[in-house]
């Protein structure tokens, strides 16, 4: 069962007025901007904000330094790769030059062997 009191309109209106009055008193009792407690809280909030900004600046500086070091490392790897590619190209060219230098010798050797074989064949007949 529901607890029901017989209240009339004036009782309800008075209760409502008292509630509004209590709410207004609570609002008025709030500390103002000039209150030392409010000034202290504001100073604490500002200190926290300054500390947060300093931490974010440190993080940004560390991130920038890491990116700079990464860029230097990347440039170093690219330079090493370029040097290695140049060395491979030089080795390939040296091998090609060696093969090119041996080609006339091989041709001459084949010609001598051919002549020896022909001359050996004439003597047998």
Image (cartoon, helix red, strand yellow):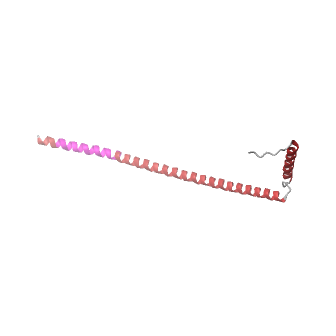
Along the line of sight, the residue nearer the viewer: 51 or 34 = 34
Residue at point 15%, 41% (across, down):
121
Q: Quadrant of the N terminus?
A: top right
Chain part drawn in magenta: 100-119
Along the line of sight, the residue nearer the viewer: 121 or 95 = 95
Task: Report the side of 107 relative to 74 (left or right).
Answer: left
Residue at point 67%, 56% (across, down):
58
Task: Report the side of 80 relative to 42 (left or right).
Answer: left
| Residue 30, placed above or below residue 12 | below
Residue 83 in picture, x, y percent from top left: 48, 51
| Residue 107, placed above or below residue 42 | above
Q: How many marks?
A: 0
Residue 66 in picture, x, y percent from top left: 60, 54
Q: Quadrant of the C terminus?
A: top left
Residue at point 79%, 45% (across, down):
4
Magenta span contains residue 117: yes
Task: Report the side of 64 relative to 50 (left or right).
Answer: left
Residue at point 17%, 42% (across, down):
119
Furthest residue toward front: 1
Residue 39 in picture, x, y percent from top left: 82, 57
Residue 115 in picture, x, y percent from top left: 21, 42
Name the chief secondary structure element in magenta.
helix
Along the line of sight, the residue nearer the viewer: 111 or 38 = 38
Magenta span contains residue 65: no
């Amino acid at each position: 069962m529901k607890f029901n009191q017989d209240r009339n309109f004036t009782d309800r209106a008075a209760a409502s007025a008292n509630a509004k009055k209590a709410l207004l008193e609570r609002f008025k009792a709030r500390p103002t901007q000039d209150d030392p407690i409010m000034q202290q809280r504001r100073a604490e909030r500002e200190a926290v904000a300054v500390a947060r900004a300093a931490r974010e600046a440190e993080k940004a500086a560390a991130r920038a330094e890491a990116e700079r070091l990464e860029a230097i490392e990347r440039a170093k790897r690219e330079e090493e790769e370029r040097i290695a590619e140049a060395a491979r190209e030089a080795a390939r060219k040296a091998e090609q030059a060696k093969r090119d230098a041996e080609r006339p010798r091989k041709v001459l050797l084949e010609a001598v062997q051919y002549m020896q074989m022909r001359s050996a064949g004439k003597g047998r007949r």
